[in-house]
Image (spheres, helix red, strand yellow):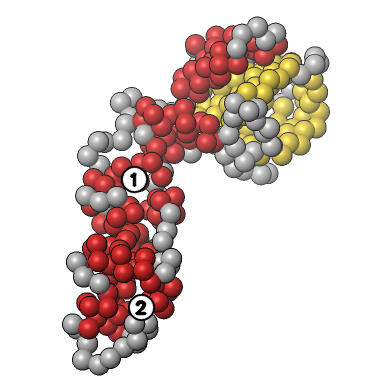
Amino acid sequence: MTYQHSMICHTEGIQPIAPVKWRGLDGLMSVFWDAEGKAGAHAYYLSPDPRMVIFFNDVSGEIRMSNRTGSFGQFDRPMTRALYVPAGVPLWTKFNAWHRFSHLDLHLHQDRLLRLLSPSVGGSVARSIVRRPVEVQNVGPIEALAALLVDEVSNPSRHAVYAESLVGSIATALLDIPEGAREQPNARLTQAQMNRLIAAVKANGGRRMTIAEMAAAVGLSESWFATVFKQTTGKTPLQWQLGRRVEQAQTLLTETCLSLADVAAQLGFSDQAHLTKVFRQIVGETPAAWRRARLNFPVPE
């Protein structure tokens, strides 16, 4: 499925001098521009997804860039031959002199980029990488890869997987990926992360949370969370969460007069029978029997 990128773009004094060439691929869009900007030309860009820009000529003497509005002359810097702009990072550019340039824009859905990186470095490391901007002047092999992609974008002659693999190679060459980066196989959740997770479960009223919600509570990707959680607790997230919910059921059974059906409903079990089945599996007896053994007064069941 082709990807339709979305970007806010305002330009003044910049115009293409040849038809724009583009190709939509799986989770990404490749766009080649041949353009010129006059002295004083300026632009603003903001995208909800990451993007990479590779220039085929040196523009550092003519184009300035900044990530702060109204900061030219204070926080601006020369435009480099290649840059990676993370999702949601604004970019302003300004021309000091007339200049003709050509560049390749690569717009990627962030999930597509994470799928590219995660198998090699792990989910949480990949999420860290895609949040770091990159600006390089020495493009080296990046330019050669980009030129191959421009040829394929201009005159498609191969299966889309060829162009997609070129984009992947450009991304891995440009992004700031520390050598040897990989999540440790014996990594564990910190106590602070476990505390945040326990607080999130309590705040949810004992109702079942999805693995995605649990992962978000501790700031990890869903797949990596499931891995390190098992290494930390010896249980899957579902098994652990059922245990926490049963603990909350025990509290309600001893500190309130709620019926078993009401306890089941309050904690998000499908019905009383479901609560009884899970409770017996974890505690070793039914909630009714467990409650009777601990209270000296009758309660509804």
Coordinates of residue 202 in the picture (x, y in percent):
37, 68
Q: Is residue 77 above or below residue 233?
A: above
Question: Is 161 positioned to the left or the right of 18 in the image?
Answer: left
**Residue, x 21% and y 91% (percent of image)?**
296
Distance from disc 2 to disc 1, alpha carbons, whole Å, reads: 31 Å
Circle 2 or circle 1, nearest the eye? 2
Name the amino acid, label 2: Leu
* Circle 1 SS class: helix
Q: Position of residue 277 (x, y in %)?
A: 30, 65
**Residue beneath the point at 26% across and 57% down:** 191
Q: Position of residue 226 (x, y in %)?
A: 34, 45
Asked if residue 297 is positioned above or below residue 2 in the image, the reply reads below
Residue matched to label 2: 260
In the figure, is residue 71 to the left or right of 125?
A: right
Res. 298 mark? none
Give the vertical position of 184 relative to 288 (above or below): above
Out of 143 and 164, give the one closest to the viewer.
164
Give the number of callouts. 2
Q: Which residue is depicted at the point 36% across and 34% down? A: 122
**Which image quarter: residue 223?**
top left
Relative to the observer, which residue lies in front, 292 or 187? 292
Q: Residue at x 29, y 44 (%)?
A: 228
Q: Which residue is mark 1?
A: 226
Please tell me whether mark 2 sits on a helix, a strand or a loop. Answer: helix
Which quarter of the image is occupied by the C terminus? Answer: bottom left
Disc on the earlier residue, 2 or 1: 1
Q: Amino acid at mark 1?
A: Ala
